[in-house]
Image (cartoon, rainbow, N blue to C red):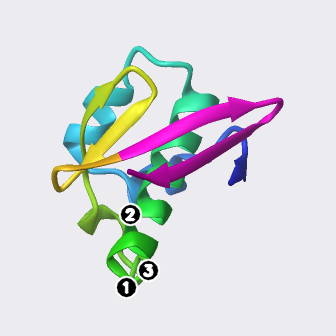
Amino acid sequence: MEIIEERSAGFYDLVFTDHELTLLKDKDQAEWTTKFWVAKEAYGKFVGTGLKGNPKNFEVEKIAEDSLWINQTEIKTIKHKNYIIGWTL
């Protein structure tokens, strides 16, 4: 769970691949970058490794409604007030 907030340019460079930046292009940046970050954290927990200091290793491949997909694993996200909550299915 993460609070929805604006992220710095440095955050984008550190966290997102070119493909992910393309997926984020026409989205609400504060909400969707938080969704991507939550998905990466949830996936890292799911595989039991955490982010290992390199969040680009866990690339969001596609968006399907409120679900994000990383390595063929669905991560569901919901917005609750000013927070994004995510979990693997």
Q: Position of residue 62 (x, y in %)?
A: 23, 34
Question: How far is mark 2 from mark 3, CA to CA?
Answer: 8 Å
Q: Which residue is mark 3?
A: 50
Q: 10 Å neighbourhood of mark 1: few (<14), some, or many (≥20)?
A: few
Contact between labelled residues 3 and 1, with CB atoms less than 8 Å apart = yes
Contact between labelled residues 1 and 2, with CB atoms less than 8 Å apart = no
Question: How far is mark 2 from mark 1, CA to CA?
Answer: 9 Å
Instruction: Say which label, 2 or 3, has the lower sequence index.
Output: 2
Q: Residue at x 39, y 20 (%)?
A: 65
- Outermost residue on the right side: it is 81
Q: Position of residue 20 (x, y in %)?
A: 29, 40
Report the span colored magenta.
75-89
Instruction: Give the camera-side residue of 4 and 69.
Output: 69
Question: Disc number at residue 43?
Answer: 2
Instruction: Give the camera-side residue of 47 and 20.
Output: 47
Q: Position of residue 57 (x, y in %)?
A: 25, 68
Instruction: Say which label, 2 or 1, has the lower sequence index.
Output: 2
Q: Amino acid at mark 1?
A: Thr
Q: Considering the whole magenta stretch, tell me its main secondary structure.
A: strand
Question: How far is mark 1 from mark 3, CA to CA?
Answer: 4 Å
Question: Disc number at residue 3?
Answer: none
Q: Amino acid at mark 3?
A: Gly
- Outermost residue on the top side: it is 26
Q: Which residue is mark 1?
A: 49
* Secondary structure beneath label 3: loop
Q: 10 Å neighbourhood of mark 2: few (<14), some, or many (≥20)?
A: many
